[in-house]
Amino acid sequence: MKSTAMLAPLLHATLVPTVRLPGVVYPPPEQLRRDTSAGFIGQTTLAEAFMATHAANAHRPALVGPEGVITHGELDILTDRTAAALLDLGLAPLDRVVFQLPNCKELVIALLACFKANLIPVCTLASHREREIGYLAQHAQACLHLVPGDDPKFDHVEFSMRMRAQVPSLRHTVVARSPARDGALSLRALWEAQDPTAARERVQALPRDPYQVALFQLSGGTTGVPKIIPRSSGDYVYNMRAVVDWFGFGAADCFYNPMPLIHNFNLVCCSAPMLMAGGAIALAPTLDAETVVGILRRDKPTWFTLPGPLLAKLQPAIASGAVSFSHARGSITSKGADMVEKLTGVPTYHVFGMTEGVIMFTHPSDSAEARYHTVGRPISPHDEVKILRPGTEEELPLGEVGEPAFRGPYTVHGYYDAAERNTEAFTSDGFYRSGDLMSKRLIDGKVYHVYEGRIKDVVDRGGEKINAEEVETAVNTHPAVAACAVIGLKDPLLGERMCVCLVLQPGAEAPTVASLGLHLQAYGLAKFKWPERIEIMTELPVTHVGKLDKLTLRQRYA
C-alpha cells in the first residue's frame, strides 16, 4: 500500500482546484503560483497532514477529558471508518455536512472523517435554531445534519426532522451521542459497521486537492444571518502549522479551550494545531465548574484559553489551591492578558483574528509592553495589513486609528455566493475590510497592532459575534414593537451584553426580557442572541443626516 506522503507529489501537480464550486471565489492563479512556490499551500491537504501526524504519534493521546482517552492511532482508525461510512450513505466528495455538535470526541471524529472523505463541514453551533440552520443548510445545499442527541434541554433529532422538511437537499440525520431513533442514524453504529482495513484503502484511494474548499465557516456578519466563508484545505494547513511554529507546540503538550471547537478561533488557533503537532486536546461537552476543574486537575493542559466568565467561576478553586496551573506553558486570550497572567501565573498572549483570514498573536519573545497593550503581529511574514481611513482606500500613517484591511496566503477572496457583500468587503486591490478599528505601534523596532474597537454593528457577547441587524429584524416581528435598535453594553464578565431599545406601538404594553425571549424562541433565533436588557423610548435618536445614532444610545445607557 502506498503511503500518503508518496502520493502527495502526484496528487498536487496542478496549481488550480480540480473542481470549481459555483459560488466560491478562488484565489487568482498568479497568487496560487506564488504561494505554492513559497511553500505556503499546495504541499499537503488537511487529511494527509493529520494522517501523517497520527502515524508519527500513534501511541500518544490525542483526545482526553472526562469521557476517556483516544490515541492518535485510534483516532486515525475511527476517522477512516467514519469517512467510509459517510460515503456509504451516498454522500459524494464536496457534499456538505451541517455540524451542530458541542465539544466532544464525536465532533473531532466526524470532522476529521469529513476531511478524509472530501466532504465539506458547515460549521454551525449546537445553540443555533431554525433561522440559522434553515438558512445555512439551504444556502449550502447540505445533505446531512449531524446532531448530538443527548441534550436534555433540546431535542435536536426532532428539530433536524423539521429542518429536513424545509430543506430538500437535507437527506440524512446522524445522531452523534445516542442510539439511532426516529429516523436518525447512529454515528457510532455507522463507523462500527466498517472494516478498518477496507476503510483505510478507500480513504487512501481518494484524490486530494489542497486548493479545494475544506470547510464552510461562518462570519460574525455585518448584515443579516451569518455569511458562509469557504476555507481551503491548503490554507488551513498553512494556518495551523504557522501557529504550531509561533508557540512551539509539541507532542508532549495538551490544549484546553472550552469555546466551540468548530469555531475558526478554537479550530485554527488552538485545538487543531495542537493535534497537528502530535499533542492532545481536552474535551468536555459541558462547561460546569466541576467538569472544568476536573480537566485542569486530571489532564493538566499545558496550554489553555479560559474566557472571563469561566475564570470568574474558577476563582474560588484557584484561591483554595484546588486548581494549579504550575504545569502550563502558556495561555491565549483576546484581551486582558495581564489580568489572566496575574490570576493564573501563566504567560498569556493576546490573539486577534477573523475567520476570513489573518491571525495575529503576541509572542513569547515580546516585551511586556507589547504583550499587554497590543494584539501582536500576523503569524505569517507574508500577511499584509493596511490601516485605512474608514470608508476610503486611503492608507493612514503609523499611530492613527482606522479600519484594518488584510491580504495574505490564507485570507479569503470572497464569501460564498454573496456577490453584493463581496463588493463591499474587499478593496479594489483585494484587501479584506474587517469592519474593526486598529492602529499600528512601533515597539523595539517591530510593528505591532492595537485593537481600537469596531465599525461594524455587532455585539461581542463572550466571544460570540452577534449581528445587531439580525436581532433587530427578529425583535421587530413582536406585535408591541414599532421600532428597535440593538446595542452592546460593557459587561465585566462577558465583554458585552445585548440591550434592545424599543419604541412601542400606540397603546401597546412593553414586553419583558422573559416574554421577548419567548417570542424570539418561537421565531427560531438562537438563545445566545436574545437581548438581556430592554429600554423603552418614545423615539430612536438619529444623526444630522437622518441615520440611527447608536453612539448616543450606547452613551445614554452605559
Image: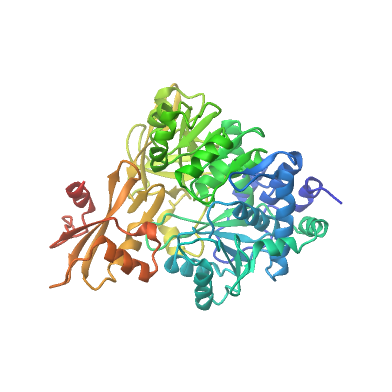
Q: Quadrant of residue 491?
A: top left
> In this view of the protein, can residue 297 be seen by the observer?
yes
The image position of residue 316, as x and y in percent, is: 40, 34
The image position of residue 536, as x and y in percent, is: 17, 60
Q: Is residue 302 above or below residue 55?
A: above
> In this view of the protein, can residue 375 be seen by the observer?
no
The residue lying toward the viewer, choosing from 280 and 18, is 280
The image position of residue 290, as x and y in percent, is: 48, 43
User: Most extreme residue toward the right, as rendered?
Assistant: 1
Q: In which quarter of the image is residue 127?
A: bottom left
Q: In which quarter of the image is residue 239?
A: top right
Q: Residue at x 53, y 60 (%)?
A: 100
The residue lying toward the viewer, choosing from 50 and 407, is 50
The image position of residue 518, as x and y in percent, is: 32, 67
Q: In this view, does 222 lie above or below 186?
A: above
Q: How many marks?
A: 0
The residue lying toward the viewer, choosing from 206 and 26, is 206
Q: Which residue is drawn at 50% across and 73% down?
A: 163
235 with respect to 195 (left or right):
left
Q: Which residue is drawn at 18% across and 65% down?
A: 503
Colour basis: rainbow
